[in-house]
Image (cartoon, grey):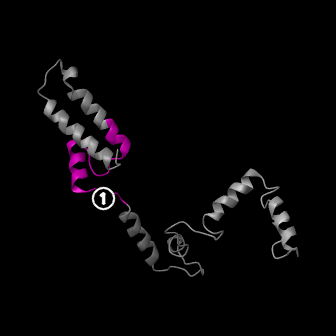
């Protein structure tokens, strides 16, 4: 019979079924937002989905000092696990990225803003136009540009 009346049926002869189907519109009366929501849900077969990697029982409960059942953590075992996980999240760069950071005179803890700022500072200082046309720093400038380009391609700057 239609939306909001699922499981209820009309009993028509074949001619009347064809006539009814030619004028029937399941989406009649739906707003644009409702229609967009229906289309989005149709992509997944109208089944509930979750973000990849989300597991409610694995994170967020034990770090708070107990599990979902309310038991305590008197020995601090779960806090230690959370601390190790936080240390593991610290960015670890490959050899090429570390070498590029060293070329710019930065350490592993540099963020994107400090990398960009250091790059701009070095380019302004070493560019031949800033040194009265002296090309003695040109090789160092090329190294810095290559290092910065590598960091950009690695999405670190």
Between 145 and 82, the residue placed more toward the observer is 145
Residue 76 appears at what percent x and percent y? 45, 76
Residue count near mark 1 (Cα–Cα under 10 Å), binned few <14, some 14–19, many ≥20: few
Drawn side of residue 140 relative to residue 26, left or right: left
Q: Residue furthest toward the left?
A: 136
The reply to whether residue 125 is in sight is yes
Drawn side of residue 131 relative to residue 8, left or right: left
What residue appears at the point 18 percent right and 17 percent down from the top-left corner? 132
Quarter of the picture containing the N terminus is: bottom right
Quarter of the picture containing the C terminus is: top left
| Residue 31 among magenta residues | no
The vertical placement of 116 against 66, above or below, is above
What residue appears at the point 49 percent right and 69 percent down from the top-left corner? 53
The reply to whether residue 76 is in sight is no
Residue 149 appears at what percent x and percent y? 28, 42
What residue appears at the point 66 percent right and 59 percent down from the top-left corner? 39
Q: Which residues are magenta?
A: 90-117
The vertical placement of 51 against 115, above or below, is below
Residue 62 appears at what percent x and percent y? 51, 74
Between 84 and 37, the residue placed more toward the observer is 37
Residue position marked by numbered label 1 in the rendering: 92
SS under mark 1? loop
Drawn side of residue 20 relative to residue 141, left or right: right
Q: Residue furthest toward the front?
A: 15
What residue appears at the point 19 percent right and 33 percent down from the top-left corner? 141
| Residue 107 among magenta residues | yes
Number of marks in picture: 1
Between 153 and 31, the residue placed more toward the observer is 31
Residue 128 appears at what percent x and percent y? 18, 23
């Amino acid at each position: 019979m239609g939306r909001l009346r699922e499981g209820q049926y009309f009993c028509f002869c074949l001619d009347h079924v064809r006539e009814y189907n030619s004028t029937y519109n399941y989406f009649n009366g739906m707003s644009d937002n409702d229609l967009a929501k229906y289309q989005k849900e149709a992509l997944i077969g109208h089944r509930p989905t979750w973000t990849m990697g989300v597991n409610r029982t694995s994170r967020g409960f034990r770090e708070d000092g107990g599990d979902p059942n309310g038991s305590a953590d008197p020995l601090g075992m779960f806090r230690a696990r959370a601390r190790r996980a936080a240390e593991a999240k610290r960015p670890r760069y490959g050899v090429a990225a570390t070498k590029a950071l060293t070329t710019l005179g930065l350490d592993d803890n540099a963020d994107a803003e400090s990398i960009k700022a250091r790059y701009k500072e070095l380019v302004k200082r070493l560019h031949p136009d800033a040194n009265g046309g002296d090309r003695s720093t040109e090789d160092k400038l090329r190294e810095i540009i290559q290092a910065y380009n590598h960091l950009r391609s690695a999405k670190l700057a």
